[in-house]
Image (cartoon, rainbow, N blue to C red):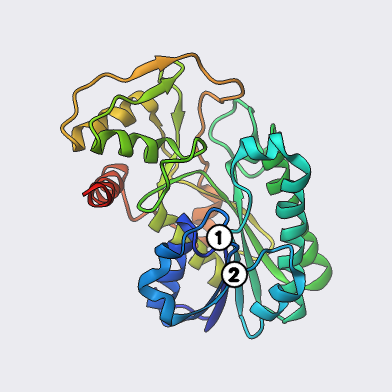
Amino acid sequence: MHLDFNSALVTGGTGFIGSHLVEALLSAGCKVTVLDNLSTGNLLNLEPVMDQITFYKNDIRELEILKKAAEGCDVVFHLAAVVAVQQTISNPVESAMINDIGTLNVLEAARANNARRVVLASSCAVYGDDPRLPKKETMTPRPASPYAVHKLSAEHYARVYCDLFGLETVSLRFFNVYGPRQDPSSPYSGVISIFMAKAVSNQVPVIYGDGNQSRDFIYVKDVVKANLLAAGSNNSAGNVLNIGTGSYVPINRLWDLIASLGGQRSAPRYEPARSGDILHSVAGMELTQSILNFKNDFTLEQGLEMTFDWYKGQRS
């Protein structure tokens, strides 16, 4: 993809989504700086390109280091965060210091360096348990966790910085992202990464509830594409946009698809539904398609196959 900017800072760039974004930026000829405290990211994700980037092992709460990292950057992609919902519930104050103050620091660092645009990673979690489908950006947010409150707060800060200071900002509400490098070992991992790990090791997965709950799963390279479009679009500044596929799959069907990739025939084990889990979620994509001219490049089946190949390679 052709980029109309030359340099970028990626916070959280050693993580699952961030590392894919860094690779895409480098492939497009962009000069890339990464800032990450490695609390959940992994330098191995960037091992093939470490000699092509400038890397800061620092925390987004360190404003002066952020300002230094953002020097000369046209665009800042902000992905660093406490992403484990349960962690924000069990330790809400520290999580808020990272997610709220950290985001404010990122915006301030971008403003201090006259960056052209900041693209923030938000989440469909801001919609909460609103049962209406699809989820549209015009719906009133109903955050049900500190994590969701943090993401909504970040969106508001971004809009204020756009309105008050002229710093162009775009907030992207990611739906359920999956793909290579997603860590299945964490209890907060996405269901696809957990299912993949079970399938390649011929183990039985656990499904909470009856498995008829459904989600909108988007392949990580499509999320990267959306970020790049948001960074370069003339119409995206000041907007909040859904990043999903506009379609959904029940969890039972998801396991069937993944199990078939590994030649598995074992039935999942069912346990009681977890408190707070929503039943259905799917992104309304009309606004995103209109503003970014965004279309997904990968079907669920294609994305699952490439992801399975990666997990299989990791196991071997």
- The crowding category of the residue bearing disc 2, from other C-alpha atoms within 10 Å (few below 14, some 14 to 19, many at least 20), is few
Q: Residue 48 location in percent, x, y?
A: 35, 72
Count numbered badges in the picture.
2
Residue 218 visible, this angle: yes
Amino acid type, label 1: Leu
- The crowding category of the residue bearing disc 1, from other C-alpha atoms within 10 Å (few below 14, some 14 to 19, many at least 20), is some
Q: CA distance from mark 1 to mark 2?
A: 7 Å
Residue at screen point 72% across, 59% down? 103
- According to the image, label 2 marks what residue? 57
Q: Earlier in the sequence, mark 1 or mark 2?
A: 1
Residue 156 visible, this angle: no
- Is the Cβ of the residue at disc 1 closer than 8 Å to that at disc 2? yes
Q: Is residue 50 above or below residue 150?
A: below
Name the quarter where the N terminus is drawn.
Answer: bottom left
Q: Is residue 289 left or right of residue 301?
A: right
- According to the image, label 1 marks what residue? 38
Q: Residue 110 location in percent, x, y?
A: 71, 74
Q: Nearer the viewer, residue 308 or 119?
A: 308
Look at the numbered disc 2 and give the secondary structure of its residue. Answer: loop
Q: Nearer the viewer, residue 273 or 278?
A: 273
Q: Nearer the viewer, residue 68 or 284?
A: 68
Look at the numbered disc 1 and give the secondary structure of its residue. Answer: loop
Residue at screen point 59% across, 46% down? 83
Q: Residue 24 location in percent, x, y?
A: 41, 70
Q: Is residue 201 above or below residue 231?
A: above
